[in-house]
């Protein structure tokens, strides 16, 4: 973007509202700063650490979200590169898949939804499950971690991420200062696929209204997708995980960060170094989103 093109800068800032005006400042430099306060006021995003003071005072650390204008996507440790603008459309689409499926979940709170899910027969996975796995953690969490589907232990206990991968997830969360109780953890699918095979498209579609209602009720400021299947299920992009990991994406207007699935780290410990960079990024984006990183 041309740093002298004030109109383009304003449009950029407005399009990125809610993503941290300080990020925009950093990307756009002084010309961006000149427009930032105005754009922020128009966009109604002042406060929470993204006001003019934060905009005018770049932080000591290098910024970690970069809007690329070049087609080259280059991975650098600790840097999230995205070319995906936040969707301009603000109207809630949370109910859409449910409506299409003839399901009206708008009256369901989390406990009622959990009960509904426990009797769900919307796909073939109902036949083989022991228990549904709805989700666990803080129903008011500002961050939600979304995995693929329950495995054997989860199916037996009715809780997400309680097997080996779950134990690693607990450690990963602790490494960035989260306990399991202060985040929310769920999966794309609420039932275990036979022999832990990959979820199929129609199974993910059948479950999506439940996930959307969970997200609508919990209203997180950031979603962390654990692995390729979760990322594909949310983002509907057949893009490689290695590319998806580099961006900040959106699911119904909520920023989505994609990281390695803990099971992948168990299989390939060489990925742990990159995974650690990703996790630090998740924490940073979370802190920025709740206004503690400014
Ligand atoms: N356990 C879960 O709950 N989800 C996964 O994706 C893997 C293990």
Image (cartoon, rainbow, N blue to C red):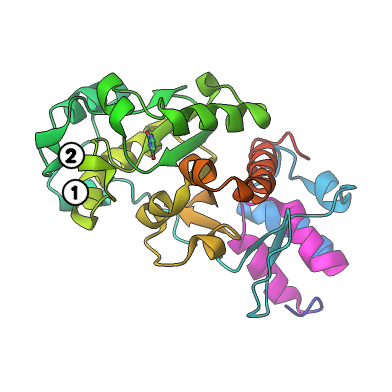
Residue picked out by circle 2: 104
Q: Is residue 55 left or right of residue 68?
A: right
In the structure shown, which secondary structural element does the residue marked by tag 2 occupy? loop
**Residue 43: image location, x then y, percent:** 62, 54
Comparing 167 with 42, the one in front is 167
Question: Relative to residue 107, is residue 70 depicted above or below?
Answer: below
Any part of residue 65 in sight: yes
225 versus 110 height, above or below: below
Horizontal side of residue 161 vs 61, given as left or right? left
The image shows residue 217 at horizontal and vertical percentages of: 38, 32
Does 175 appear above or below 124?
A: above
Q: Quadrant of ligand 1?
A: top left
Picture quadrant of residue 123: top left
Residue closest to the eye, 290 or 13: 290
Q: Residue 126 appears at what percent x and percent y?
A: 13, 36
Q: From which residue to which does the magenta span run?
A: 5-31
Q: Is residue 71 left or right of residue 141?
A: right
Mark 1 vs 2, N-terminal side: 1
Residue drawn at (46%, 34%), measured in percent from left and top?
A: 165
The 10 Å Cα crowd at callout 2, few under 14, some 14 to 19, many 20 or more, is some
| Image coords of residue 99 (percent x, y) | 19, 49
Circle 1 residue: 99
Residue 29 counted in the magenta span: yes
Give the CA distance from mark 1 to mark 2.
6 Å
Question: Which residue is located at x 30 percent, y 19 percent?
Answer: 157
């Amino acid at each position: 973007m041309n740093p002298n093109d004030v109109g383009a800068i304003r449009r950029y800032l407005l399009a990125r509202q809610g993503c941290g005006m300080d990020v925009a400042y950093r990307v756009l430099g002084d010309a961006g700063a000149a427009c930032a306060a105005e754009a922020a006021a128009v966009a109604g995003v002042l406060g929470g650490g993204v006001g003019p003071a934060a905009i005018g005072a770049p932080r000591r650390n290098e910024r970690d979200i970069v809007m690329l204008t070049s087609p080259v996507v280059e991975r650098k440790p600790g840097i999230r590169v995205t070319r995906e603008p936040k969707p301009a459309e603000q109207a809630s689409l949370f109910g859409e898949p449910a409506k299409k499926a003839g399901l009206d979940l708008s009256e369901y709170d989390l406990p009622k939804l959990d009960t509904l899910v426990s009797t769900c027969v919307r796909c073939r996975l109902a036949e083989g499950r022991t228990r549904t796995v709805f989700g666990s953690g803080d129903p008011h969490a500002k961050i939600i971690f979304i995995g693929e589907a329950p495995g054997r232990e989860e199916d037996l206990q009715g809780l997400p991420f309680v097997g080996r991968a779950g134990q690693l997830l607990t450690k990963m969360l602790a490494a960035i200062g989260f306990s399991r109780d202060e985040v929310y953890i769920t999966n794309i699918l609420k039932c275990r696929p036979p022999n832990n095979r990959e979820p199929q498209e129609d199974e993910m579609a059948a479950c999506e209204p439940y996930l959307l209602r969970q997200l609508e009720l919990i209203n997180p400021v950031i979603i962390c997708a654990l692995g390729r299947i979760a990322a594909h299920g949310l983002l509907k992009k057949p893009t490689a995980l290695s590319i998806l990991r580099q961006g900040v994406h959106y699911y119904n207007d909520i920023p989505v960060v994609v990281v390695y699935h803990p099971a992948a780290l168990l299989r390939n410990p060489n990925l742990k170094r990159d995974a650690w960079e990703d996790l630090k990024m998740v924490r940073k984006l979370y802190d920025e989103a709740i206004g503690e990183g400014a």
